Image (cartoon, rainbow, N blue to C red):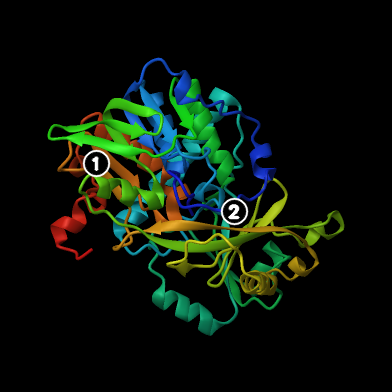
Amino acid sequence: MNQSGMSQHEGTVAPSNDEHKFATMSISSTSTESQGAWHSETIIVGGGVIGCAIAFELASRGQEVLLVEQSQIASGASSAAAGMLAADSEAFAHPLMVKAAYDSRELLHKHKEQISALTGIDFGLRRSGFITPFRSYSDLNQYKNKWKGSSGAEQFWWDRPTVQREAEWLNRETYGAYYRPLESEALPVSLTRAYARSAQMMGARIWEGVQDVRLVVNNDGVRGVATAKGEISCKHVIVAAGLHGGELMYQVGETLPTRPVKGEIMAIRFPQDQAVYRPDRTIYAEDVYIVPKVNGEVWIGATSLPGRKDHSVSANSVQRLLGAASYWVPGIKGADFVRAWAGVRPATPDGLPYIGKCENIAGLYTAYGHFRNGILLSAITSQWIADMLEGKSAQEIGIEAFSPDRLKRKGVML
């Protein structure tokens, strides 16, 4: 889900300061007014998790990089995500998405080590496993018939006695469940800000509050970006602006559209005397997900409302999410409601992100349209973009399917 500027997604209602406080850090971004040199080798447009991960990767390779964000780092979709790294549990339709999910999940754990060594920041990443439960044998069969996840997913079948032994807080009538031990989750705001802070410590510049960003190109390719403060020259521009990426690209004659899909999410907290009923692993069910966080909260989500760009949370959605969640974890009925928020995610016409080099404009790259998998795919996206800036082709990397020019080649009507 995104923000109303140039973040990873469209605008959201921020999920409070709890997560920001979990990771003790400061971004200390610099105003463009105080900059002496209005140039950078590479400019990243968008301060969500994708843009900040790319800044981190480029800076770690010694590249000169400037990231510009209309609002604040992680103030958009990255603050509205649940932070699940569901490489085994998500039903990806394309084989490249499956591979990307696995590779990115493992790479993110390596990034955790780098970031921790560099900054000491903890962004709540943990590998506690996901549970996908079923009400009946019939429900299990329906799931098997339609599930398109990887056949190589590491998973174990838990029958009813095993479920009752391993997850005492789960509904005692649960028929059975798949347990996927490698699945992970993180605090998305903390992750995004950790990427940004680490990038800064390695020399990247981050400018927040940069309004009216426009791409500047000519017949030779990218020349820079224009802003309300003035123009900044560069050799490369990476558009990582989520839902607004399409608008930026359209300004220079490239049609790479996204459509908004609103999602609502909520947080609860178990009182101390109810802690025994609190789940200790993520529930990834057909109708709801329930994600326990290291900050003590449990997040419940999410709705999917195509075409919606507002950031309100309806009473009906809260009721539906609570109803679905409390079926699987009955103890939720005794938990305290904390808050609810919403964000807007950028979906593409074919369900794949736009990642790569634009054929028609030298120096222009895209990294947006990740829909509901921005957190999961952030690490691998940053690696791919950095590899391309160093001269590797999409074919060499094996990501032609994500090319920003693919829809044009296929003759897709947009």
Judge from the rendering whether residue 60 lies leftward or rightward of residue 343; answer left or right.
left
Residue 412, how many percent across, how many down? 19, 64
Residue 54, how many percent across, how many down? 39, 35
Q: Secondary structure at mark 1?
A: helix
Numbered mark located on residue 379 in the image: none
Neighbourhood count class around disc 1 (C-alpha, 10 Å): few under 14, some 14–19, many 20 upward: few
Q: Which residue is mark 2?
A: 13
Residue 42 occupies quadrant: top left
In this rendering, the answer to whether 149 lies above or below 111 is below
In this rendering, the answer to whether 271 lies above or below 142 is above
Q: Which residue is mark 1?
A: 397
Question: Which three-letter amino acid code belongs to the residue tagged 2?
Answer: Val
Say which of 83 and 64 sits in front. 64
Number of numbered markers: 2
Residue 107, how many percent across, how many down? 43, 39
Camera-nearest label, 1 or 2:
2
